[in-house]
Every structure is written in structure tokens, then in C-alpha cells.
Amino acid sequence: MFQVPRLTPRLTGAGLVVLLVASTVAWVAPAGAQETSPDASRSGAGSYVLGLEISESYHNKITVRRPRAGGFSLALRGGYRWETFGGFLLAELIGWEGTYVGEEHFELAADVGIGGEMVYWDRRIRTALIAGTSVLLRENPIDPAGEVGFFVDLRPAGLRFAVGDTFSVILEPVTLTMILPVLSGIPMIVIQYRTVVSFEGWL
């Protein structure tokens, strides 16, 4: 069975630094060319929007598992954005650490959901809510792989940085995600606080 390297606090801290540096670069890059109030075309309004999301969770609260552990997620989303509101589908792969009777174990789950978003304040702020199905991909000493539950993901305020006319970077400093991939027996409830960086383009 393959082994996944342990996500240490040092790695978690390094990941946060990388995310912050990426957001700074995204802000500086368009500074010379971006107007004070970007028009609708630079927000993807009236367009199909595709996005890639990378996140690191710096605090996990897990039932019957280790209370604090690192984690990550990688997601793809696609949808349509009107003037202010938008809807999209999201597919996400999530990994985190758990502990069972003193034994560390790497968890893996897949989420598929539907979300809604609102872009406001000169289209520089994005708020989103996502919910859907969560599937446990890797078995552990308590739960078999293939268990199905649900997840809810709240993104209260993401900072949008336009890069050209068809691309933007979004930094979401703090998001709240609740994942329940196992509902039977002893439910697995994972609460994550994440920092998320998204790269999106529109057609």
C-alpha cells in the first residue's frame, strides 16, 4: 500500500506562505494596466467560467481522530456567471491526517457538489456556498472505502485579482468546510479551516 508523507506543521506553514506569495504576485501583475473599477467583462459576467482550486487546511477538527492535522484539496469547477450571481459544479479531491488508537492514517475523499456565488464590490470580492456528495476513497481501521455522505463548504469573502480580460486569481484567506463522508456506525465528521487559491478563466 502506498504511503503518503505526513503533513507536518512546518509543511502547513510553508503552504500558507506559498499561498500568500501567489496572491501578492496576482495583485502586482495587473497593477499597471488595471483600471480602478473593472468592467463586467473582466469579472466573467455573462460567461462560462472554468476554475482550478488549490487549498491547504491549517486546522482540522475530526471525530474519533486526531484533533489537529494538516490537509489539502485540489478541485475543478465550471459554471456560468451572470452580472452578480453565478452557479457552478465542483469536483474535489481532499486529503487529511487521522489517528486511530495511536496509529496515524492518511484519509482521502472525493466531493462532487453544486454551488452558488456572488461577486460584488467592484467585482473584487467573491462569496460562495457549495454542497454535495462526499465519498471516502481510502479505507481506514474503522471505515471501508466507498462510504457515501455529504459536505458543505462556505467561502465568506474571496479577494479577486484580474489578470488581463479573461483570467483572474482568487485568494480566500479563511473558508469553512464540513465533510461527512461516513454517516453509518461512528460518523466521520471533518471540520476544516482552509486557505484557498483559485485560478479562473472565462469564455
Image: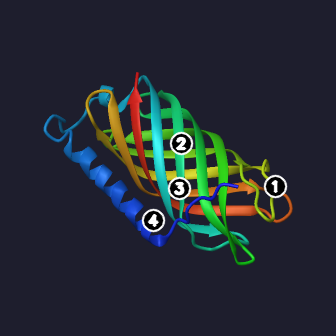
**In front: label 4 or label 2:** 4
Question: Which sits earlier in the primary sequence, circle 4 or circle 3?
Answer: 4
Position in image of residue 117 (x %, y %) = 49, 40
Mark 4 and mark 2: span between their CA atoms?
Answer: 19 Å
Q: Is residue 104 left or right of residue 127?
A: right
Q: Amino acid at mark 1?
A: Pro
Q: Are marks 1 and 2 in contact (CB under 8 Å)?
A: no
Q: Are marks 3 and 1 in contact (CB under 8 Å)?
A: no
Taking the view exactly as shown, the residue that stands out farthest to the front is 1
Q: Secondary structure at mark 1?
A: loop
Taking the view exactly as shown, the residue that stands out farthest to the left is 32
Q: Which residue is mark 2?
A: 75
Question: Is 183 situated above or below 168?
Answer: below
Q: Are marks 4 and 2 in contact (CB under 8 Å)?
A: no
Q: Which residue is mark 1?
A: 144
Mark 1 and mark 4: span between their CA atoms?
Answer: 28 Å
Q: Is residue 59 left or right of residue 109?
A: left
Position in image of residue 110 (x %, y %) = 66, 46
Q: Amino acid at mark 3?
A: Phe
Q: Secondary structure at mark 2?
A: strand
Q: Nearer the viewer, residue 125 or 176?
A: 176
Q: Which residue is mark 4?
A: 12
Q: Residue at point 66% right, 58% down?
A: 107
Quadrant, the C terminus: top left
Question: Is 190 situated above or below 68?
Answer: above
Mark 3 and mark 2: span between their CA atoms?
Answer: 10 Å
Q: Which residue is mark 3?
A: 72
Q: Amino acid at mark 2?
A: Ala
